[in-house]
Amino acid sequence: MARKFLYIVAFLTALVIAAAIVFRIWGNELIRWRFVPATAFEAQAALPANAYDAPEMWFARPGVKENAASWTPAGYEAKAKGKAAIFFIHPTSYLTRDHWNAPLDDKEANDLTDLFLRGQASAFNAAGDIWAPRYRQATFGAFLTTKPDAGSALDMAYRDVTRAFDVFLREIGPHRPIILAGHSQGALHLMRLLKERVAGTPLAARIAAAYVVGWPISRTADLPALGLPECTRADQRGCILSWESFAEPADPTLILDTFDRTTGLTGQPRRGTRIVCTNPLTGTADAAAPAGANAGTLFPAQDMSGATVEVGKVPARCAGRGFLLIGEAPQLGPYALPGNNFHVYDYALFWVNIRADAARRLAAR
């Protein structure tokens, strides 16, 4: 019996090693096969101009019941809500290859978005009302291919975002301060929104801060087109914060390989350029801070009902081309990406500091 058990262990070990070798050689191809749609992009009509008048088109906005963005962990309920209006663009939650763009009623994607709102957008709910639109997001596989279909899917998603943004601006009126925020795909759309709808307009003066998190911004090939400067001071108003979190040893090769092959929003190549890196523990650029400066990391639970906040657990420092290094990998959950990339947890790692950062920038003059 003991010998048979050893044979089984040896076989399973060999199987794991073989699988690792296969993935190492053909990993990218396997991932693309799993997530990139095999069908052609399906062009769809633009949403009506008044589509976002309906509360059902929003995950969060004033008056929406069961608003996931209003969630807080125990002990962090807002005593008084600020006067800002926050426009939050959620990250990719549609992970199938059935379509290039998510149907608005896809339950699995919408349930995952609710979790993202609890772990990310909730950081801003003390600052004011959060508006988070549903949109026909591009599927995860759109970021794994250079097919023209992927660009078409992202364009369609962005058009929905702009429709929602128009309604957001109309409903909040002409005077309220605004916070713009997004993550991953949401941050990509936010960059385009800043370039096309904010830069060079009177609206720029109302932006207290723009949190463009989880998507690289080239300081020379992107930032000049966005209409707002990089945040370099903790009390600076009207500026952009951005970071991408990696535990150490960090390997951002997968990001840089793609980033360096692209052209920035200014029309200049991104190759070799430095990336905007805000340290959310200090609110400043290219800074370093010890774990003691972390006022609270959000440790998620499956449905967030058991989530906890722990103080002083995660340090942060900007390094290399502009990535945010967080020391040894914290035990936040199973979703770290290759290269020790903690992309999924970009907000959770610094949840309390982000909450304080938003309040500080709103109070700045």
Image (cartoon, grey):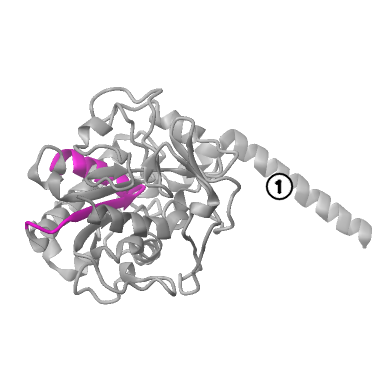
**Magenta residue check for 135:** no
Residue 336 visible in rendering: no
Residue 316 visible to an observer of this rendering: yes
Q: For the N terminus, which image quadrant?
A: bottom right
| Foreground pick, 161 / 125 | 125
State the residue at coordinates (36%, 66%).
114
Q: Of helix, strand and loop, which one carries label 1?
A: helix
Judge whether 338 appears above or below 73 on screen.
Answer: above
In percent of the image, x 30 and y 65: which residue is there? Answer: 125
Image-based side of 212 in relation to 245, left or right = left
Q: Quadrant of residue 312?
A: bottom right
Residue 39 appears left or right of 195: right
Q: Indicate whether 297 appears above or below 74.
A: above
Residue indicated by mark 1: 16
Vertical relation: 131 (above or below) 13: below
Q: Position of residue 145 (x, y in %)?
A: 39, 37
Front residue of this view, candidates 212 and 30: 212
Q: Is residue 321 left or right of residue 126?
A: right
Query: Magenta region: which residues?
Result: 174-197
Going 29% across and 38% down the picture, which residue do you hit?
230
In the rendering, at what x and y percent does residue 50 appear? 8, 61
Q: Nearer the viewer, residue 199 or 78?
A: 78
